[in-house]
Image (cartoon, grey):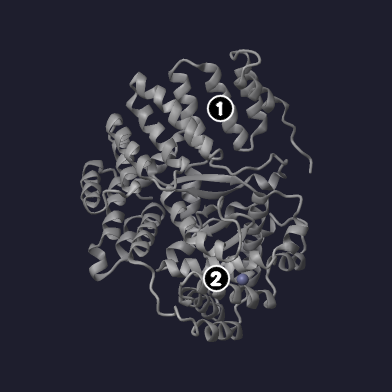
């Protein structure tokens, strides 16, 4: 286990240290299976069990086997980039994109799918894609399934489950199907646990798109790429890679290929129409390629460590900004904050307005116990963030807390509240907000905030306990008191 890992691990019940790693690991309590994780992801997630970064669950009671977790990664930089990739494609498809959510699953296998307004991508899929165009191509294809209503069968079967439960189930079923397809019994058995009671045939019917749907989605994708002036090359390249991997015996099958059959004739037909595109040779804008490279190297640094970062770029690119970004992150993770800070500062000279460099600077400064400087760095990150994400505001609040000055702690309450208002499911943030309220002596609000954190983690019982405690300290009838009452009255729904 690399040294840096101890930095990203969560401390005991507090579990709050996860956010200091830049990427935030958490878990979605969903219908999924622990074994679904790649080893690296499992390592990370198991260290960060306390820091729940759950998506809304509507508190449907989960069966016992659902209590394992899918490791979800939260990161402002990657989420913003993915939304920028998706926005034009969704618009071309005539779909509402204003509230697109991107969910990153810490898993090194390739998988991507779209449900409603959520886009799920395995981090492995992002790391394998060398260009933005490859990710955008897969997004375009998935959007084609969405626009074509190909998921209606799925929705009909699972209409009682909420969106995240559907997603979790899909992931789990992906494992079952992959295990079956590869003849890997251990893997198959792992997935079988979650698809309890669902016969294999039903699972395949539920999961796999039909051949006609693949053709339709391919054509829709080409259409969206044409409308947005982008090359279909990346999509073709990705699918060709899958088609050839499928033909090799013994190769581990990615979940994506199970749900998207890739027979040769499909790839052939796709190639024919793709090459007719006037944008076939069009490259991604250099600025977008740089953001993409920085995303990939960040994932490599946090999930695989130094070796992966060093292997990612060759020749000229090995001295480029993305490679240096990865190097700075690794330096930080390996516990050399001073050297890491120098590296980030050097990068900032060429990209002074990159909010995520300021964010990294803030993280390094928190680690160096320079709270006031960290707060200044985060303030800059927040002011430069075009996506206005709640994650950076929460980070700013965390830095203000680290400073510890009374005025900063007050300001931390404001920033953390604002961040959580924008991103209610960012459960780690409630821990900091509760801590900030505690430091200002407002125990009632600290307990209500803890109740909220449990509520959004799907732990209704604990949420009610803290809400009841909060009520004894809050003024009866005040808005926080009413909110506590709402939590106390919350019924777990038998749906
Ligand atoms: Zn497909």
Front label number (1 vs 2): 2
In the rendered image, residue 167, in percent from the top left (x then y), is placed at 64, 55
Dot 1 beta carbon under 8 Å from ligand 1:
no
Lateral position of residue 265 relative to residue 433, left or right: right
Res 224 label: 2
The residue depicted at 62 percent of the width and 67 percent of the height is 178
In the rendered image, residue 64, in percent from the top left (x then y), is placed at 70, 44
The answer, for residue 15, to whether it is visible in the render is no
The answer, for residue 338, to whether it is visible in the render is yes
* Residue at image mark 1: 450
Could you say which is closer to the camera, residue 308 or residue 418? 418
The residue depicted at 68 percent of the width and 41 percent of the height is 58
Hey, which quadrant is residue 27 in on the image?
A: top right
Quarter placement of the C terminus = top right
Mark 2: secondary structure: helix
The residue depicted at 31 percent of the width and 48 percent of the height is 357
Could you say which is closer to the camera, residue 227 or residue 371? 227
As drawn, 105 above or below 383? below
In the rendered image, residue 16, in percent from the top left (x then y), is placed at 45, 34
Q: Quadrant of ligand 1?
A: bottom right
């Amino acid at each position: 286990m690399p040294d840096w890992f101890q930095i990203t691990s969560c401390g005991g019940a507090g579990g709050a240290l996860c956010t200091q790693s830049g990427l935030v690991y958490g878990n979605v309590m969903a219908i999924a299976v622990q074994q679904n994780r790649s080893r690296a992801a499992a390592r990370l997630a198991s260290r960060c069990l306390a820091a729940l970064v759950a998506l809304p669950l509507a508190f449907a009671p989960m069966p016992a086997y659902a209590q394992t977790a899918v490791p979800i990664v939260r990161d402002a930089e990657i989420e913003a980039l993915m939304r920028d990739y998706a926005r034009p494609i969704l618009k071309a498809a005539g779909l509402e994109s204003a509230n697109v959510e991107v969910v990153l699953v810490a898993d090194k296998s390739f998988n991507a799918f779209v449900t409603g307004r959520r886009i799920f991508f395995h981090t492995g899929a992002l790391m394998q894609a060398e260009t933005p165009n490859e990710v955008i191509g897969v997004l375009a294809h998935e959007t084609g399934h969405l626009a074509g209503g190909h998921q209606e069968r799925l929705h009909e079967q699972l209409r009682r489950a909420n969106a995240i439960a559907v997603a979790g189930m899909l992931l789990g079923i992906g494992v079952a199907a992959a295990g079956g397809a590869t003849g890997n019994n251990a893997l198959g058995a792992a997935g079988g646990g979650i698809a309890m009671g669902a016969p294999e045939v039903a699972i395949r019917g539920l999961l796999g798109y039909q051949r006609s749907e693949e053709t339709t989605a391919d054509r829709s994708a080409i259409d969206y790429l044409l409308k947005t002036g982008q090359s279909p090359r990346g999509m073709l390249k990705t699918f060709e890679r899958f088609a050839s991997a499928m033909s090799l015996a013994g190769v581990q099958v990615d979940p994506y290929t199970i749900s998207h059959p890739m027979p040769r004739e499909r790839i052939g037909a796709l190639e024919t129409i793709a090459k007719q595109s006037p944008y076939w040779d069009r490259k991604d804008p250099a600025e977008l390629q740089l953001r993409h490279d920085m995303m990939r190297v960040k994932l490599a640094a946090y999930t695989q460590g130094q070796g992966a970062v060093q292997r990612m770029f060759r020749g000229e690119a090995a001295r480029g900004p993305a490679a240096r970004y990865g190097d700075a992150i690794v330096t930080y993770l390996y516990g050399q904050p001073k050297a890491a800070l120098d590296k980030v500062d050097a990068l900032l000279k060429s990209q002074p307005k990159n909010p995520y460099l300021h964010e990294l600077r803030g993280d390094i400064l928190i680690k160096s116990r320079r709270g006031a400087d960290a707060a200044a760095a985060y303030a800059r990150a927040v002011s430069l963030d075009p996506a206005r994400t709640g994650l950076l505001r929460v980070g700013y609040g965390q830095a203000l807390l680290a400073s510890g000055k009374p005025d900063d702690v007050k300001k931390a309450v404001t920033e953390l509240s604002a961040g959580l208002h924008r991103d209610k499911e960012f459960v780690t943030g409630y821990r900091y907000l509760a801590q900030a309220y505690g430091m200002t002596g407002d125990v009632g609000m600290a307990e209500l905030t803890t109740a909220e954190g449990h509520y959004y983690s799907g732990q209704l019982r604990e949420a009610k306990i803290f809400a009841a405690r909060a009520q004894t300290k809050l003024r009866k009838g005040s808005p926080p008191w009413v909110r506590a009452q709402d939590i106390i009255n919350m019924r777990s729904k038998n749906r």
